Amino acid sequence: MTRPPRSSEPSASWPLFLTAHAGLLRALGARLKQAELPPLEWYDVLWALERAADGRLRMSALAEQLLLTRFNATRLVDRLADAGLVAREKTREDGRGAYAVLTASGRDLRRRMWPVYRAGINDLFEQHLGSRDHAALQRMLRAVIDGNREADPGES
């Protein structure tokens, strides 16, 4: 993997951000695999459902939370359903909609994954930055998020 150039130019920030993000996701995925746990994407689905009321979300809402297309969220939920971690339920409101529902097995797996994930966050990310760095990074990321809220058609 090539490293992005060192520069204080704003145009250098984007490739650095993408490189850091991709590297962190790869390393976290490797840690989960080494611990014989499923991929990080599974954790994201299980965590989103665990936080939801009644452990269920409409597929469209889940896709939105995961920043995935509905098609990709559906395929991911299908894999989790095949593993018994998520169930699908038709909506009562209309015949076309469906809920993804967290199962007890899904909740247990998410809880087993968390210590590996948490240790990875600390080892690979948090420990490399001081408290001022974290505060500055949080301010910067919030500025980017807030600055793009109006541009995001999915936001309300």
Image (cartoon, grey):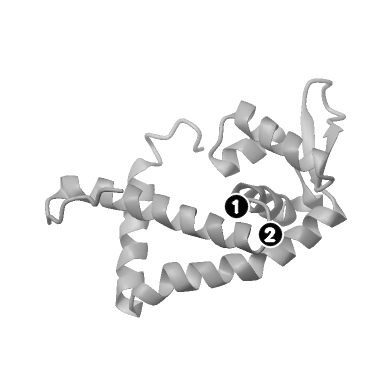
Rendering coords of residue 139 (x, y %): 33, 63
Figure label count: 2
Residue designated by label 2: 36
- In the image, residue 153 sits, relative to residue 6, either above or below, namely above
Q: Secondary structure at mark 2?
A: loop
Is the residue 45 above or below the residue 34 in the image?
Answer: above
Query: Is 115 located above or below residue 27 in the figure?
Result: below
Residue depicted at 66% across the width and 40% down the height: 62
Q: Which mark is residue 57?
A: none
Q: Nearer the viewer, mark 2 or mark 1?
A: 2
Disc 2 and disc 1: Cα gap in Å?
12 Å
Q: Residues within 10 Å of mark 2 (few under 14, many from 20)?
A: few
- Which element carries disc 1, helix, strand or loop? helix
In the rendered image, residue 118, in percent from the top left (x then y), is placed at: 57, 69
Left or right of 77, for residue 128: left
Give x and y (percent) for residue 43.
65, 53
Residue at x 84% of width, y 45% of height: 84
* In the depicted structure, whether residue 59 falls above or below residue 94: below
Instruction: Say left or right for 34 vs 80.
Output: left
In this rendering, position of residue 21 left or right of residue 115: left
Residue at which label 1 appears: 40
Toward the bottom, the furthest residue is 131
